[in-house]
Amino acid sequence: MAILDDGTLSMAAESGKGSPRGGQMFSEVMDHFGPENVTSFEAKWVPAMPSNLDKFNANLRAGMSYEDAAANTFTGKMTAKYGLTDVTVDKSVLRGEFGHYTNVEPVFSRPAG
């Protein structure tokens, strides 16, 4: 499922047996909406879909900043391919302990200018 609302893309994708890989799904969504129409991507990482969340937490524990930790996830790398390289992590919505968060909602945007 993917939604584009006023330039902001959000989606939920989980690859499984017989489904395309995550990178292919992301690319297909971007192609569908047109990368030029996507100005930001809002993510929500929770334990039910742990891959980005686990990587984010591991990155924090390795000493990365919140923004670098988010950028160094699968979603961060995919959004960067489309020019969404400014990362914001709203610490007010984080749930859990440092390095063991259970809710993270980063936003990946195009740089201004």
Image: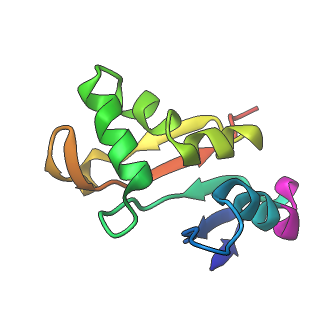
Q: Is residue 15 positioned above or below 111 on the image? A: below
Which segment is the magenta one?
31-36
Residue that appears at 65% across and 65% down: 9
100 sits left or right of 65 in the view: left
* Colour scheme shown: rainbow
Q: Is residue 77 positioned above or below 19 on the image? A: above
- Give residue 62's position: percent from left, percent from top: 29, 22
Q: Quadrant of residue 95?
A: bottom left
- Give residue 75's position: percent from left, percent from top: 57, 48
Residue that appears at 56% across and 45% down: 74
Number of residue marks: 0
33 sits left or right of 104 in the view: right
- Give residue 88's position: percent from left, percent from top: 46, 41
Residue that appears at 16% across and 39% down: 98
Residue at the extreme bottom: 1
53 sits left or right of 68 in the view: left
Residue at the extreme top: 63
- Give residue 93's position: percent from left, percent from top: 27, 57
Q: In this orientation, which residue lies closer to the viewer: 83 or 50?
A: 50
Q: In this orientation, which residue lies closer to the viewer: 102 or 54?
A: 54
Residue that appears at 41% across and 32% down: 69
Q: Quadrant of the C terminus?
A: top right
Q: Is residue 22 magenta?
A: no
Residue at the extreme left: 97
Q: Main secondary structure of the magenta part?
A: helix
Q: Is residue 3 positioned above or below 76 on the image? A: below
Q: Quadrant of the N terminus?
A: bottom right
Q: In this orientation, which residue lies closer to the viewer: 63 or 16?
A: 16
Q: Quadrant of residue 33?
A: bottom right
